[in-house]
Amino acid sequence: MSSWIREAIKRPGALTTWFKRNRKKLKRLLGYDPFTRKGDIRDKAVRDLIKLYKAGKIRLSKTILRRLYLARTLQRLRRRH
């Protein structure tokens, strides 16, 4: 793993915990369960939350927004390799 990735991930699992805590709200907002059957966060859920934030339809803290962007970046890297 690259050094920038290790430095970027301050609290592993924090975004998953946030998703679990807000699961009902996210289901209502997105129209689908943000988790896969395996228990991972759906890639589409991350992308859709960022879209909703940019459209001004939801408010997110800077920390959560930063974690969403990092998750999206890591998803793209995973797809590339």
Image: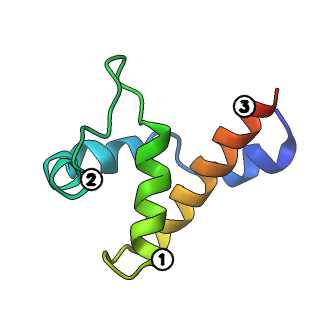
**Residue 15 location, x and y as percent?**
43, 48
**Residue 50 location, x and y as percent?**
48, 64
Q: Is residue 58 above or below residue 4?
A: below
Q: Nearer the viewer, residue 11 or 79?
A: 79
**Residue 8 location, x and y as percent?**
70, 54
**Residue 40 location, x and y as percent?**
41, 28
User: Which type of secondary structure does the marked residue at label 3 adopt?
Assistant: helix
Q: Is residue 65 above or below residue 42?
A: below
Q: Residue at x 31, y 47 (%)?
A: 19
Q: Type of residue at label 3? A: Arg
**How many C-alpha atoms fall within 10 Å of the one at disc 2: few (<14), some, or many (≥20)?**
some
Of labels 3 and 2, earlier in sequence is: 2
- Colour theme: rainbow
User: Which type of secondary structure does the marked residue at label 2 adopt?
Assistant: helix
Q: Residue at x 25, y 37 (%)?
A: 33
Point out the image quarter for the C terminus: top right
Point out the image quarter for the N terminus: top right
Q: Residue at x 86, y 39 (%)?
A: 2
For residue 18, side relative to residue 10 (left or right): left
Q: Type of residue at label 2? A: Leu
**How many C-alpha atoms fall within 10 Å of the one at disc 3: few (<14), some, or many (≥20)?**
few
Q: Type of residue at label 1? A: Lys
User: Which type of secondary structure does the marked residue at label 1 adopt?
Assistant: helix
List the residue tagged with mark 1. Answer: 54
List the residue tagged with mark 2. Answer: 30
Label 3 to label 2: alpha-carbon separation: 23 Å
Q: Is residue 58 above or below residue 38?
A: below
List the residue tagged with mark 3. Answer: 79
Label 1 to label 2: alpha-carbon separation: 15 Å
For residue 17, side relative to residue 63 (left or right): left
**Residue that extends furthest to the right in the rendered view of this protein:** 2
